[in-house]
Image (spheres, grey):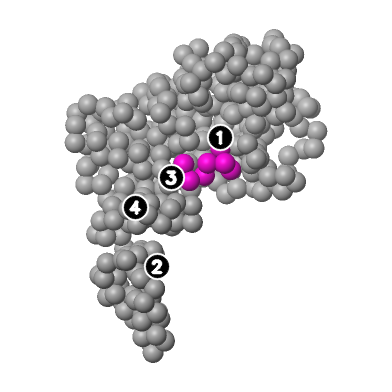
Amino acid sequence: MANSTWPKEEINPTIYSEDIKWPKISIVTPSYNQGQYIEETILSIKNQNYPNIEFIIIDGGSTDCTLEIIKKYEKYITYWVSEKDRGQSHAINKGLEKCTGDIFNWLNSDDYLEPYALYNIALGFQAPHTKVVSGIKRTLSGNKRNLNEPFPLVGSTMEALSEPSYAQPETFYKMDVVRKITPLTEGLHYSMDLAMWYQYLLLYGIENVISIKKVIVNFRYHGESKTVTGESNFGKEQLLIYQSIFDILRSPQTSNNLIITKSQIIISEDEITQAIHLGYFKMVLKYKGLFSKKDVVLLIQKIDLKALGRQQQLELNEINFTYTASSLIKTMVSIIGCFSKNFYQRILISRFFCIIPPN
């Protein structure tokens, strides 16, 4: 648990050994009317006392107390501006244009870094060939403080590409890598970080990504956060990203939502296709309670069953049956299933009846 005085209390700067060349870390904070939170954001960066920091705030023309707070700490901010923009992705892109560091991430104006976060991230990048360092986040919701598990950096690139979630706040990139997978797509308002991550995987794979068991960031859930108010939109944008990857595979040019090209991708088309179909399946599990019935069925219809294992196929078939079968068919299956105590037999019965089209 974070110290109760943080982020108001400074870290002792003597932890930064003079024997280490500390890389410049660039942090961009996109902001709009988050005056009740942004002071903690600023202090959590300032009070790291990191010796080589570049801190940029891009405000979208806030009308609350945000500007007053920014001006209060202006001498600790490398660059800031307050003017109307086209949304979060545009704001981050504007900040990136000002960045000159070796390492990059953005920190939203309602979140704040953990003590020693930048120290631990910088040490993670000391390992040779490291391109990405990811830690742990603590989620804050009201009075609840939950420590999340480290982002699951799975064993294969394809498995990572199939994951429908991404741990942006606690994940930092080498800047030379960021330049190849940005600017962020302004048309994506929820999953632009996922698009960035998928492009990284397509260009570099998972091998040079390091996971550290250190808390890096405190991530807030509140009534106005996009994570709370638009959760299903993350899934809808993920579908757009997957479709954009398919568009790239079919064309040597970039797609509307991604900037990489087919010639840059280091993974085979077959592997990518299989990973995306597995990703569709994981999306069904994640979003079936958030998407409309129609959208769940359309998502299921995208899936090539050959990309799934047997247990996954059976699970998908059960979901499909729930969403598409008529009430009469469900009753018949329920009655027949009562005579079978074997789970797999009941699934097979359901699967047989799934060939009957819905009402």
Q: Is residue 326 magenta?
A: no
In the image, what residue type sits under mark 3?
Gly
For label 1, the SS is loop
- The extreme front residue here reads 359
Residue located beneath label 2 in the image: 322
The image shows residue 110 at horizontal and vertical percentages of: 65, 31
For label 4, the SS is helix
Q: Which mark is residue 307?
A: none
User: Alpha carbon of mark 3 to alpha carbon of mark 1: how far?
Assistant: 18 Å
For label 3, the SS is helix
The image shows residue 341 at horizontal and vertical percentages of: 41, 86
User: Alpha carbon of mark 1 to alpha carbon of mark 2: how far?
Assistant: 36 Å
Horizontally, residue 57 falls left or right of residue 241, namely: right
Residue located beneath label 4 in the image: 299
User: Alpha carbon of mark 1 to alpha carbon of mark 4: how far?
Assistant: 28 Å
Asked whether disc 1 touches disc 2, contact meaning CB atoms under 8 Å apart, the reply is: no
User: Alpha carbon of mark 2 to alpha carbon of mark 3: how far?
Assistant: 21 Å
The image shows residue 233 at horizontal and vertical percentages of: 46, 41
Is 330 placed above or below 313 here? below
User: Alpha carbon of mark 3 to alpha carbon of mark 4: how far?
Assistant: 11 Å
Point 49% across, 16% down: residue: 94
Q: Dividing the image into 4 quarters, which one contains the N terminus?
A: top right
Q: Earlier in the sequence, mark 3 or mark 1?
A: 1
Q: Earlier in the sequence, mark 2 or mark 4?
A: 4
Nearest the viewer among 264 and 273 is: 273
Q: Tell us which disc is closer to us: 2 or 3.
A: 2
